[in-house]
């Protein structure tokens, strides 16, 4: 993640700060572009939350997956309100970080929600993460992790 989020600090829904490189090391990273005021985002977020819970929170051992929310909200308050609905293991780029806008440009985000799946190196696995989660559920993660070439000691 050095190319994408290296040197950045991310925030948890509980307000704790973490170093991106340490938190995302050897993981498939799902950049989740979403906004509180977006009805499709409010619809997809519970699906993604369940997807993440099945793979990471309830799995032994947990899958090497990290979700990083990139807010498209118009205010810090909107972002904070939305973050209260997110799982504690999710991370977010802080609202005040202008890099949120650079990521939207870099990954050609024109509408939300959008789920961009990345290798640990930052290389894109797919821009169709949302569609794949909706259509294939947990099964899509196996194909992501195979392409990502991360250590895998779990089963989907």
Image (spheres, helix red, strand yellow):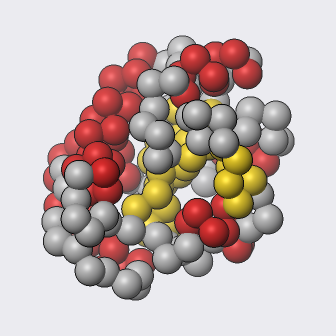
Screen quadrant of the N terminus: bottom right
- Quadrant position of residue 18: bottom right
Rendered location of residue 122, percent (x, y):
59, 71
Residue drawn at point x = 66 percent, y = 42 percent: 16
- Quadrant position of residue 44: top left
Rendered location of residue 103, percent (x, y):
69, 50
Apparent side of residue 14 relative to residue 136 in the rendered image (left or right): right
Residue drawn at point x = 31 percent, y = 81 percent: 152
Rendered location of residue 66, percent (x, y):
46, 57
Q: Is residue 47 visible?
A: yes
Residue drawn at point x = 56 percent, y = 34 percent: 13
Q: Nearer the viewer, residue 17 or 148?
A: 17
Q: Is residue 29 above or below residue 146?
A: above
Q: Nearer the viewer, residue 20 or 144?
A: 20
Q: Is residue 12 above or below residue 2?
A: above
- Quadrant position of residue 24: bottom right
Apparent side of residue 140 relative to residue 128 in the rendered image (left or right): left
Screen quadrant of the C terminus: bottom left
Apparent side of residue 99 relative to residue 55 in the rendered image (left or right): right
Q: Is residue 111 visible?
A: no
Residue drawn at point x = 22 percent, y = 59 percent: 59
Q: Is residue 5 above or below residue 68?
A: below
Number of callouts? 0
Rendered location of residue 22, percent (x, y):
63, 69
Q: Nearer the viewer, residue 145 or 59?
A: 59
């Amino acid at each position: 993640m050095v190319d994408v989020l290296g040197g950045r600090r991310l925030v948890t829904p509980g307000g704790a700060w973490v170093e991106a490189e340490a938190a995302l090391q050897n993981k498939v990273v799902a950049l989740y572009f979403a906004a509180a005021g977006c009805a499709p985002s409010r619809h997809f977020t519970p699906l993604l939350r369940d997807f993440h819970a099945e793979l990471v929170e309830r799995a032994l051992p947990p899958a090497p997956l990290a979700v990083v929310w990139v807010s498209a909200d118009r205010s810090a308050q909107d972002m904070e309100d939305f973050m209260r609905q997110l799982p504690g293991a999710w991370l977010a780029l802080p609202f005040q970080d202008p890099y949120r806008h650079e990521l939207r440009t870099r990954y050609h985000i024109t509408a939300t929600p959008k789920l961009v799946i990345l290798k640990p190196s930052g290389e894109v696995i797919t821009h169709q993460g949302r569609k794949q989660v909706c259509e294939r559920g947990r099964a899509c993660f196996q194909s992501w992790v195979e392409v990502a070439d991360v250590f895998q000691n779990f089963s989907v």
